């Protein structure tokens, strides 16, 4: 467990650089681990650095939903399972899907416990403003996860305060987290959506992603659930985030072969079933720009993302200003992902 | 000059921390200097770290505007001088002010060279979307600076490509930069708005801000120009940024006694005339969240900002999620600003 007196893990290393005018302007440090069938294949920084996975662990948080039988009892589709693992941008499509899901459960928006925020989707945001309508909890980027939480809660006959740390759902998620990370929970935080978030190590999170990657679709209940969630995410990238967002564009660029997920404060994970590898990374400063650049670099390195794919240019390489002039570049730090 | 082979200045130090669930979740390193009448009073990290000041140096870029006599010839008001030093959010008020300024010069939007981007101001953004109107260069957060550039260019009878590095305006700005920072230009980058941006050290930038702070309103031409710009910024905080933005809310909280300015990639400066001190800081990772927290801390430390003022809570202290639950805190790192 981190010593709270220490201001930082001293072992983080440069991962991503921003260059301007031939000089280094900004720099992002962090930790990254690639976990393969034999354990850690590569690491940068400290694999044992303790992090909050934030939304990057939504596929772990969805395991009880499937393993309990709740998902099948509710007839959830792969598209809904992808939404349960999503940080969506609250577009009309996402809002309709969550609304219909709650309706099918006989529940409604007030049953959610995620809180409300403005949708990141421009069109839905404009629609709300023109209708003089406040955003509701369904617009919260985590509302699909919470619909999954409510599906479990309804199936289990558990109480409505499903985000409380001692609620049976959160106890089940905590147990699943410890099992797939093979690491005891190293701390508990409250996430933006009010659900508990369990601290683990970067290596533990990468190990969990490798377990998802290696899961046999015909295996035991845990393996079947993992394989089903990975497939749902990889084949419905539009549900996991939204148009123009890194998770969606990069998963599309990888043609359904890989599932990836971002988390707040610059966590990013990837599940690579064909090579049975899992990736986890954390940028120390919490910058999404850097976590997106870093995962892009690691996916290219792993051979699952074509460096020339147009989706890559949003995260790595030449930077231009509002008049299209080249101002510099975002690069991987020397020694990272090489 | 930075060695471009070095991935970072090794001497940056922790400045700002994000805590969650009793654990350090994210950390921002950087450099900060307080420059007083006798030189450096306090520093954290490396005072000689080379940085691009970005928009934090707009008051330096406005010196030729006043010193040439162009500002007086055009009858510029303090409100317009504040706008020349602004990174405004493109609200209706800012758009009207720049439009009227260009009109008075007999110029128009196509004469600008800053490029277009969507305004950060929600109401103006909504207005544009409803009118099916694209944002124009006047919405660019730097359009006030560029109106000042055009005022100088018109007055000097110089050519229209005023953002080119060899344009007489940019040569004048480069000379002023070297004079007030007392540091040779250490690199040239192209800024988001296409103007050249001259690299200097954190100490050089703090020294320049101290020169603004100490400038005698009845002194020589340089001192009068500096005092006039500082006063314009401090007394028109709404023109320097906009409603809800750190520069505006913190300057308001300091009641016109202090001028502050943010720059992209997490630079922040402050001019404290009453104590003749200047402050400059750079967060290594470029995070505005951290530069705002750091300058807030330094202003409190300097005794010019009340730690209990409501504007402080946006940048330092308890963090809450969408349901109002406490999730953690943004804190100054141990040893910083104490």
Image (cartoon, coloured by chain):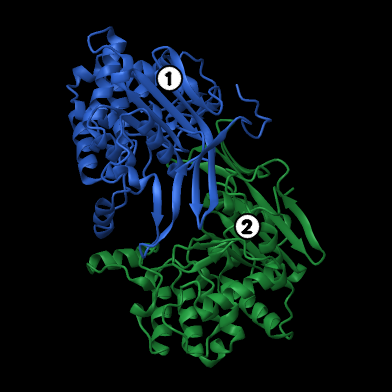
Chain colours: A blue, B green
Looking at the rendering, which quadrant does residue A327 occupy? bottom left
Look at the numbered disc 1 and give the secondary structure of its residue.
strand
Residue that sits furthest to the top in the current view: A220
For this rendering, which residue is in front, A185 or B194?
B194
Visible in this render: residue B249?
Answer: no
For this rendering, which residue is in front, B203 or B23?
B203
For this rendering, which residue is in front, B90 or B34?
B34
Q: Which residue shows up at 46% across the image and 13% down it? A: A182
- Disc marking residue B60: none
Residue A229 image point, x, y percent: 27, 22
For this rendering, which residue is in front, A319 or B331?
A319
Asked whether, in this view, residue A232 is left or right of residue B201, the answer is left
Look at the numbered disc 2 and give the secondary structure of its residue.
loop
Residue that sits furthest to the bottom in the current view: B73
In the image, residue A177 sits, relative to residue A4, either above or below, namely above
Q: Are marks 2 and 1 on the same chain?
A: no
In the image, residue A181 sits, relative to residue B202, either above or below, namely above
Q: Which residue shows up at 23% across the image and 26% down it? A: A232
Looking at the rendering, which quadrant does residue B104 occupy? bottom left
Mark 2 vs mark 1: in front: 1
Q: Name the residue under label 1.
A: A35
Q: Mark 2 points at which residue?
A: B309
Tell me if mark 2 has few (under 14), some (14-19) or many (20+) residues whose alpha carbon lies within 10 angstroms of its own: few
Residue A323 image point, x, y percent: 36, 65
Tell me if mark 1 has few (under 14), some (14-19) or many (20+) residues whose alpha carbon lies within 10 angstroms of its own: many
In the image, residue A263 sits, relative to residue B81, either above or below, namely above
Visible in this render: residue A180?
Answer: yes
The chain letter under disc 1 is A
Residue A180 image point, x, y percent: 41, 15
């Amino acid at each position: 467990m981190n010593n709270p007196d220490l201001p930082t893990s001293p072992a983080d290393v440069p991962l991503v650089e921003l260059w301007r005018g031939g000089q280094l302007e900004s720099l992002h440090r962090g930790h990254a681990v690639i976990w393969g069938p034999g354990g850690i294949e590569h690491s940068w920084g400290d694999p044992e650095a303790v992090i909050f996975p934030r939304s990057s662990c939504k596929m772990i948080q969805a395991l009880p939903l499937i393993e309990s039988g709740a998902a099948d009892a509710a007839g959830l589709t792969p598209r809904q399972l992808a939404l349960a693992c999503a940080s969506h941008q609250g577009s009309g499509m996402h809002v309709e899907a969550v609304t219909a899901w709650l309706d099918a459960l006989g529940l409604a928006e007030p049953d959610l416990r995620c809180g409300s925020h403005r949708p990141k989707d421009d069109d839905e945001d404009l629609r709300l403003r023109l209708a003089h309508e406040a955003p509701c909890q369904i617009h919260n980027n985590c509302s699909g996860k919470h619909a999954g939480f409510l599906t479990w809660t309804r199936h289990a006959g558990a109480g409505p305060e499903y985000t409380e740390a001692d609620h049976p759902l959160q106890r089940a998620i905590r147990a699943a987290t410890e099992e797939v990370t093979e690491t005891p929970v190293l701390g508990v935080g409250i996430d933006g959506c009010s659900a508990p978030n369990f601290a683990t190590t970067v290596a533990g999170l990468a190990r969990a992603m490798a377990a998802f990657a290696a899961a046999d679709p015909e295996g035991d209940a845990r393996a079947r659930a993992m394989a089903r969630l990975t497939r749902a995410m990889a084949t419905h990238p539009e549900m996991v985030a939204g148009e123009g967002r890194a998770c969606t564009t990069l998963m599309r660029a990888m043609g359904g072969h890989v599932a990836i997920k971002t988390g707040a404060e610059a966590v990013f994970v990837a599940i690579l079933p064909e090579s049975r590898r899992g990736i986890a990374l954390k940028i120390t400063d919490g910058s999404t720009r850097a976590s997106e650049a870093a995962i892009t670099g690691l996916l290219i390195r792993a051979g699952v993302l074509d460096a020339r794919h147009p989706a890559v240019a949003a995260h790595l390489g030449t930077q231009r200003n509002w008049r299209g002039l080249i101002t510099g570049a975002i690069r991987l730090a020397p020694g990272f992902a090489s």
